Image (tube, coloured by chain):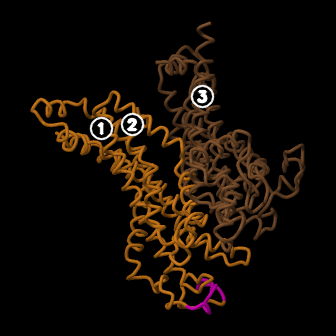
Chain colours: A brown, B orange
Amino acid sequence: MQALGAPLAFIVKRAGQAILVMLAIAVIAFAVKGALGDPLREIMGETVPEAERAELRHQLGLDAPWPVQLARYLGHAAQGDLGQSYIYKRPTLEVVLAKFPASFELVLAASLIVLLISLPAGIYCAVKPRSLDARLILGLSVLGISVPVFLTGIILISIFSVWLGLLPAFGRGETVRIGFWETGLLTLDGLKHLLLPAITLSSIMLPLFIRLVRGAMLDQLGTDYVRTARSKGASRLRVWLHHALRNALIPLVALGGLQIGNMLAFTLLTETVFQWPGMGFLFLEAVTRADVPLITTYLVAVGFLFVVTNTLADVVSLWLDPRISLEGRR
Amino acid sequence: MTGESSRTALASVRAFALDQPGSVVAACLLGAIALAALAAPLIAPQNPFDLASFDVLDADLPPIWLRGSDLRFLLGTDSQGRDLLSTILYGTRISLTVGVFAVAIQAAIGIPLGLIAGFIGGRVDGLIARVADVQLSLSTLILAIIALALVRAGLGGETLGRIAVPLLVLVIGLAEWPYFARTARAATLVESAKDHVRAARALGASDGTILRRHILPNILSPLIVVATTQVAGAVMAEAALSFLGLGLPVTQPSLGTLIRSGYDLIFAGIWWVTVFPGLTLVSILVAVNVLGDTLRDALDPRLTPR
């Protein structure tokens, strides 16, 4: 009972924290909205007489004291109503959610590339630190970490789109709609459009993850139980993968979780270069055209994604290493 | 006695540099770029911030080894007719300025906090570690993008352009102090347990004196490693923000702004406006990262040959 209760308590506690953080983000979004936007100017323009303005202000409840307005905003937000977009004349949440599949598929494709390359490469660099190959991989990773993601995108576009004319330079191409989800993964054209952005996005995360895998493996390889496993006659490969890698995964998940914010930023940059119609691209459009409700909705949506993925990373860490829940109770 | 550990660290760095000649090349390259950027007003053929010094008629000229070029413009011109070489020199100056000042702010916040956390320990340490964790998980780049986007949406693009340099320094500087704090804390913990610190305390030195004269000088080498990689990060963050149109304006371009303005031209075959600033940016970042890596590996006990 005790063994089952501790992880459950941990998850409940983390979920509670997540809700608190979301509440804080919503309050910030409300403050931003108040500081940036005058909805009246957007609705009526500048030339309408003051009496009419006051009338509308009263109708919209904008003359209420701010705690009342905040409560109203949070109430609406809880029901999924975050306001109307000035540009699109539609509910902002609808607009942002419609762009989510594009961003998600880009991040998914990039993460797959990162995972498939960084694990073998990182392990290799840790077990053979002085070999020529390891030095080459690390040298290339310094180069990879030093080329900003937007520049990688521009270089790839120059080579594969402008020069060779092989791959498309922008947009998502042909998409298929399944329910509310618009996917580009099921058409050849969609996959072709995905290739360059996915490589671009993975190029900036890859060197970092190779280093993280290498560092975590190096830490594990120095431990007593790895040496014991070797001395009792376990094969090299078994020791690397079964003993060292399994335990190296624990700090990796935690450190990987720290990269979620960076991933959001890099996705936004990649989307800008390739004019990929995702959430980041939408956000920059909203900023240039001062669509305040859309800006605040993006903040809430990104905050939500951030909180959910972080909580998931914590739960996965717990699943990998049950000791964490005990530390959490101290 | 106090200089002992830093002297051995220096010796191991020197041995490592001889072992890895790449880091020496990187140091020379970085020095040359920094010097050229510093001397930009003296050596640049043109002042790119002075509207009277260039002419739209000279726009989009290629570098001098290509057909249709003009001997006055070594690397060609951009779409406003500015000499690209001069613009790059001035742009590098801005990029490096933002990077160095941002890291100075990070160090000014992070090092004292780390010293205090490591020296006092207990509840203060726990609190600082907690705040640092939260700050780190938020990602500088996304915070900076959001902060500058809000300034832009609120005050307009023109006002943002005018206050861009101090704003970028502040935003990038405030967000990344935990790296300094963590390193300073870990090193302080090791150092405070050493005999010379205990001896100083036994002789009646105050906490402030111990921190300043006996601990800080001995933990400088790991902090220098952090500072190196942080400068690379700050320069890259500035470039990314300017590329998004949230940093320096076209009238006062940094390397990121130049790459942004060149991006629209690559489809017309005008590649040089992107490529030369891009190469400069990558050279700076590669050089700084190679240096940082060499220093870090030299000080990493896990990698010393056993």
User: Which residue: 65% across, 31% down?
Assistant: A312
**Magenta stretch prevailing secondary structure:** loop
Q: Quadrant of the N terminus of chain B?
A: top left
Q: Which residues make up the magenta segment?
A: B55-67
Q: Dot 1 corresponds to which residue?
A: B116
Q: Position of residue A151 (x, y in %)?
A: 62, 63
- The mark found on residue B128 in the picture is 2
In the picture as drawn, the residue positioned furthest to the left comes out as B203
Q: Is the residue at mark 2 from the same chain as the one at mark 1?
A: yes
Q: Are marks 2 and 1 in contact (CB under 8 Å)?
A: yes
Of all residues, the one furthest to the front in this rendering is A51
Quadrant hosting residue A303:
top right
Q: Chain of mark 1?
A: B
Badge number at residue A179 = none
Residue at 62% in and 74% down:
B261
Q: CA distance from mark 1 to mark 3?
A: 32 Å
Does B13 sit left or right of A4 as displayed?
A: left
**Residue with the mark numbered 3:** A16
**Mark 1 belongs to which amino acid?**
Ile
Callout 1 secondary element: helix
Please name the amino acid that badge 3 sits on: Gly
Cα distance, mark 2 to mark 1?
9 Å
B132 to A45, vertically: above or below:
above
Q: Tags 2 and 3 in contact by the CB under 8 Å rule?
A: no
- Answer yes or no: are tags 2 and 3 on the same subunit: no
Q: Is residue B206 left or right of residue B106?
A: left
Query: Which mark lies nearer to you, 1 or 3?
Result: 3
